[in-house]
Image: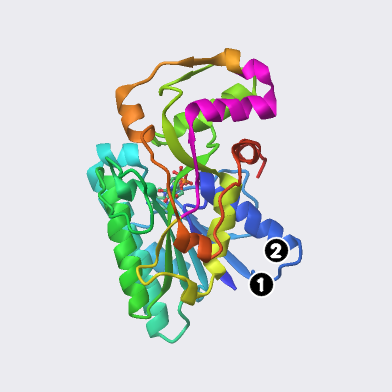
Amino acid sequence: MHVLVTGAAGFVGQALVARLLRDHDDGHRSLQALTLLDVGFPASTTGAARQLAGSIADAGLVRQAFERPVDRVFHLASIPGGTAEQEYELARDVNLGGTQHLLEAARAQALRGEGVARFVFASSIAVYGSPLPALVDDGTAPNPQMSYGAQKLMSEIQVADFSRRGWIDGVSLRLPGVLARPPARTGQLSAFMSDLIRELAAGRSFTCPTSPQAATWASSVPNVVDNLLHAAEVAAGCLPPRRSLLLPTLHFTMGELVHAVAAVHGAQVHELVRWAPQERIEALFGCFPPLRTPAADAAGFRHDGDLPTLVRRALQPL
Ligand SMILES: NC(=O)c1ccc[n+]([C@@H]2O[C@H](COP(=O)([O-])OP(=O)(O)OC[C@H]3O[C@@H](n4cnc5c(N)ncnc54)[C@H](O)[C@@H]3O)[C@@H](O)[C@H]2O)c1
């Protein structure tokens, strides 16, 4: 099996690649070739995989990734929400144009008779926008309010259409906030949730830009990797025709998250938090209603189970 991961040097990408390589070493020998595509790679990356450094906005580079037929694509590369809002043309070229190049390369492969790739697209709950209804479920209409969410939704539609035509076998997962992102700033507005867990777990004080009542959705990075890997293998018959899934995800308040960090790392955590709500952050990340995900549940996707488990898994080494 030849697996292609775009955005492989990113937060989720590194965790996914580490898991693919570990599973391979543990005897799951289906992985024969791994191609990683990103704008650059850390010097420390090992040479177990083929690395392609460059942009998915470059159609030629994307075609190179498909020189050997690809069986599974994990398309994670993207310009995040904050940056996409500031740099429209970059986000258009990468989030829309880059996705299109990948889909076209997969289509060309299928038309050459070299196999239909399972195409797992990392979409986002940003497709829902705001305000959200009292309950979000599989029937909730997307209503993106930022270019990033709009670009994710347009790409989902392309993934579904290419799947309908039989050029790819696609799955779009609407990922929630993924925890805990490393401290480096890369434009994600939701990074404060990761900071909260990491700083409090390390015994450092943290000023939270929401109220304790702010309610959100999130999953640990190992849980998201589990779901991406499941998406790569789940039978097409288990997927809805539109090929997009809202993932099972824990719904909790920031106050409950602090309690969970205290349950895992000690009661002193409560003394370390100061609440300083910012209107924009509260509006974007603090108004999430309960969610129901029967389609993804039935297809075998899972959330972290409970908040202390999410907190523990969020800081697990890769
Ligand atoms: N982390 C989250 O909370 C979250 C939530 C919802 C959806 N998602 C989606 O999941 C995916 C992975 O998220 P992440 O947190 O790892 O993001 P990330 O920003 O950490 O990683 C994205 C990677 O894409 C790469 N990239 C950017 N432009 C590129 C280009 N033109 N060509 C090739 N590579 C490029 C970046 O260099 C980076 O390594 C993204 O598509 C993101 O939109 C993430």
What residue appears at the point 58 percent right and 64 percent down from the top-left corner?
34
159 and 76: which is toward the camera: 159
8 and 249: which is toward the camera: 249
Inter-mark Cα distance, 1 to 2? 7 Å
Disc 2 C-beta below 8 A from ligand 1: no
Which kind of residue does numbered mark 2 sit on? His
Residue that label 2 marks: 24
Tell me if residue 88 comes above or below residue 226 in the rendering.
above
- The quarter of the rendered structure image containing the C terminus is top right
Answer yes or no: is residue 311 visible.
yes
**Please, what is the dominant secondary structure of the magenta stretch?**
helix
x then y, percent, for residue 45 = 61, 48
Magenta stretch containing residue 255, yes or no? Answer: yes
245 and 212: which is toward the camera: 212
Tag shown at residue 30: 1
Query: In the current view of this chain or complex, which residue is farthest to the right?
Result: 26
Q: Secondary structure at mark 1?
A: loop
Q: How would you rate the neighbour count of disc 1 (Cα within 10 Å): few for under 14, some for 14-19, many for 20 or more?
A: few
Q: How would you rate the neighbour count of disc 2 (Cα within 10 Å): few for under 14, some for 14-19, many for 20 or more?
A: some
Dividing the picture into quadrants, the one containing residue 48 is bottom right
Which kind of residue does numbered mark 1 sit on? Ser
x then y, percent, for residue 191 = 45, 33
Q: Secondary structure at mark 2?
A: helix
Query: In the current view of this chain or complex, which residue is farthest to the front?
Result: 134
What residue appears at the point 34 percent right and 77 percent down from the top-left corner?
164
Answer yes or no: is residue 184 visible.
no
Bounds of the magenta segment: 247-269
Residue 267 located left or right of residue 137: right
Disc 1 C-beta below 8 A from ligand 1: no
- The quarter of the rendered structure image containing the N terminus is bottom right
Dividing the picture into quadrants, the one containing residue 199 is top right
